[in-house]
Image (tube, rainbow, N blue to C red):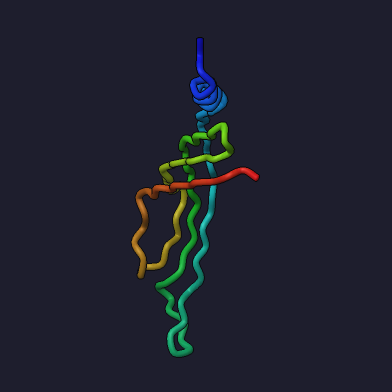
């Protein structure tokens, strides 16, 4: 016979879910101004596709991780292009 604690643990495991997710995001960074002069080689724009996974617990908490891959980048010479980025998220439903 299962104890109450065992039932709570089983319920938490059975009601938890792991989902795949995908994000399409964009970034924009304006040009930097120093002493009233606009630096032409700063700023940029990019579009990212980020596949990942999310764990949703039965208690309302979630955690997600993803690896972003650039689909398009127009980055100023002051910043290198990016090959990838990693995103981590922790959340709580309310």
Q: Residue 14 versus residue 17: which sits nearer the camera?
A: 14
Residue at image location 62% in from the left, 43% down from the top: 93
Residue at image location 54% in from the left, 21% down from the top: 4
User: Is residue 30 placed above or below 88 in the rendered structure?
Assistant: below
Q: Residue 2 versus residue 32: which sits nearer the camera?
A: 2
Q: Residue 43 versus residue 85: which sits nearer the camera?
A: 85
| Residue 69 figure quarter | top left
* Image position, residue 88 (x, y; %): 44, 47
Q: How many marks?
A: 0
Residue farthest to the bottom?
35
* Image position, residue 53 (x, y; %): 47, 35
Residue at image location 44% in from the left, 41% down from the top: 65
User: Is residue 63 placed above or below 29 in the rendered structure?
Assistant: above
* Image position, residue 19 (x, y; %): 52, 30
User: Is residue 77 placed above or below 59 in the rendered structure?
Assistant: below
* Image position, residue 26 (x, y; %): 53, 54
Q: Which quadrant, please, contains the C terminus? A: top right
Residue farthest to the right?
94
Q: Residue 25 versus residue 55: which sits nearer the camera?
A: 55
**Taking 55 as reference, is 93 left or right?**
right
User: Is residue 79 placed above or below 15 in the rendered structure?
Assistant: below
């Amino acid at each position: 016979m299962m104890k109450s604690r065992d039932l709570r643990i089983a319920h938490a495991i059975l009601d938890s879910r792991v989902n795949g997710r995908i994000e399409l995001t964009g970034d924009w960074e304006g040009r930097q101004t120093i002493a009233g002069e606009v630096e032409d080689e700063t700023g940029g724009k990019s579009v990212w596709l980020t596949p990942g996974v999310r764990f949703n617990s039965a208690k309302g908490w979630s955690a997600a991780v993803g690896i972003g891959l650039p689909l398009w980048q127009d980055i100023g010479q002051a910043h290198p292009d990016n090959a990838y980025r990693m995103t981590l998220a922790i959340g709580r439903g309310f």
